[in-house]
Image (tube, helix red, strand yellow):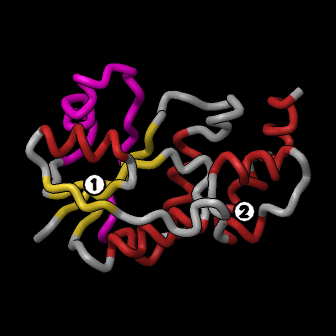
Amino acid sequence: MVTALFIGRFQPLHLGHKSAIEHILSEVDKLILGIGSAQYNNTLDNPFTVDERKEMIEMVFSSSLDKIVIAPVSDIHNEPKWVEHVLSSVPSFDVVYTSSPIEKRLFSEAGYTVVEIPYFKRKVYSGTRIRNLMAQEGSWRELVPSESVKIIEKFGGVARLKSLME
């Protein structure tokens, strides 16, 4: 049984994340989704709380929750201790899936197997781009799963982003 780790901020959970997670789920038995920057919310880069992001994941992957464990991972801003911090924050895993060069290097140096996962239409599915579109009343809804849209609207995410830009 192979358990994988995939860390993302999911600010918000968009279709690029969904494609990456579906890809990983097709290759492993269990997936630990680390919600990165878990302690941050109500900022331009991190407008959604860890609970709101968790709800997005649970709604989008409701039919796969038997294969998914969701774990908050706070930032510690200390690269040499980061892998140790992640290990203390999530259940054990066998392999790391990432598109981050830093994560790839750190987990490889710690002895983990790392699978590089490609970005899925990175220029289209960018959290920064989506947050900007939300704040500027642009077309963002087609870039996120419909379940994420519902959660964002439920928590007033667009209004929150607009107020953060003022």
Task: Residue type at mark 1: give it.
Answer: Leu
Residue range highlighted in magenta: 67-91
Q: Is any part of residue 158 visible from this angle?
A: yes
**Residue occupying the point 51% across, 62% down:** 17
Is 164 a magenta residue?
A: no
**Residue occupying the point 70% across, 66% down:** 143
The answer to whether residue 116 is above or below residue 65 is above
Task: Residue type at mark 2: give it.
Answer: Val
Q: Residues within 10 Å of mark 1 (few under 14, many from 20)?
A: many
**Residue occupying the point 50% across, 51% down:** 54
Which quadrant of the figure has residue 147? Answer: bottom right
Q: Is residue 49 left or right of residue 86?
A: right
Total numbered labels placed on residues in the image: 2
Label 1 sits on residue: 5
**Residue occupying the point 16% across, 45% down:** 108
Question: In the image, residue 27 lies at what x, y percent?
Answer: 26, 76
Q: Is residue 109 left or right of residue 132?
A: left
Helix, strand or loop for disc 1: strand
Label 2 sits on residue: 149
